[in-house]
Image (spheres, rainbow, N blue to C red):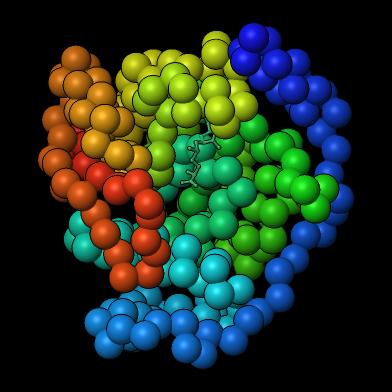
Amino acid sequence: MKNFKNQIDFFLRQYLGFSRKNYSEKNESKEGLFAQQKALEREQYLLEKFGLETLKSNSTRQNYLENLYTVDLLERFFELEFRDNLTVLDIGCKNWCYARGEYFFFKRYCKNLILDGIEIDSNRLYTNFYNRREVAKFHIKDLKGAKYISKDFLRHDRRYNYIMWFLPFIIKEPMQKWGLPDKYFQPEKMLSHAYELLNSGGNIFVVNQGLTEYNVQKGLCQKLNIPFILLGEVKSEFLNYEIPMFAMVLNKN
Ligand SMILES: C[S@@+](CC[C@H](N)C(=O)[O-])C[C@H]1O[C@@H](n2cnc3c(N)ncnc32)[C@H](O)[C@@H]1O
């Protein structure tokens, strides 16, 4: 029954694609955002290292935290060499509210950055009648080389140096609750395709919600013979999730 409803809703969203245009968010003061000294010090460090001043002076408090969280995780787990060109993909980027975190992180390590975000359900509407694509357009508007792609990832075939995958659907129930039809539940195919699109020497960074999903993710990598490094539970000074987050890095030689 749930699947039937999701199929109809998804079809209507794809077909009608209605949204208000020109979404924007107003800057909010960041005063008193962190009480903890540790968080203040980490913020300062990331601000300087990745040049996040424009992010800080042009974001809501929530969006600033979402992006700091992203840079914080990436900085801890990735050590990159500087190069001329870098291609990065985010799979299932939703409204891409954390695009600037990814962008400023990777931009520090290259001259030319291509950052793609792909989302199958970009027409999904928020209660303010903007859809995800319109919101994402706002978040990437000043990021040269960033592109939001409304498409099924399984139909995408560009190659990348790095792939970011925050909260993939690895178990069916969360995906059904999210509103996607069951036919899009293909975790093994998705992972295998992501690995195919990864250049040699590249990495896929996966963050799973909860231990059960993390274990299923691990099992999938083992089944597909994909080498991985477990990072365990990941916490950040900037966002606290009710359900613990776990991460791993997949490698390709
Ligand atoms: C749990 S959400 C995570 C969203 C976002 N990465 C975040 O961390 O907030 C998973 C996202 O993946 C998208 N998705 C699922 N299957 C997809 C596919 N085949 N191609 C592109 N996006 C997909 C969903 O529509 C959803 O927005």
Residue 201 visible from this viewpoint: no
Residue 105 pos. (x, y %): 37, 65
Residue 66 visible from this viewpoint: yes
Q: Quadrant of residue 124?
A: top right
Identify whether 95 is placed above or below 5.
below
**Observer-nearest residue: 77 or 128?**
128
Labels in figure, total: 0
Residue 132 pos. (x, y %): 68, 45
**Observer-nearest residue: 137 or 247?**
247
**Observer-nearest residue: 252 or 59?**
59
Identify whether 39 is placed above or below 243.
below
Q: Quadrant of residue 94?
A: top right
Residue at the image position 83 percent from the left and 44 percent from the top? 19
Q: Quadrant of the C terminus?
A: top left
Q: Is residue 85 left or right of residue 214?
A: right
Identify whether 70 is placed above or below 216.
below
Residue at the image position 61 percent from the left and 73 percent from the top? 60
Residue 56 pos. (x, y %): 52, 81
Q: Quadrant of the N terminus?
A: top right
Residue at the image position 53 percent from the left and 44 percent from the top? 93
Identify whether 164 is placed above or below 36.
above
Residue at the image position 63 percent from the left and 67 percent from the top? 142
Residue 174 pos. (x, y %): 47, 28
**Observer-nearest residue: 33 or 44?**
33
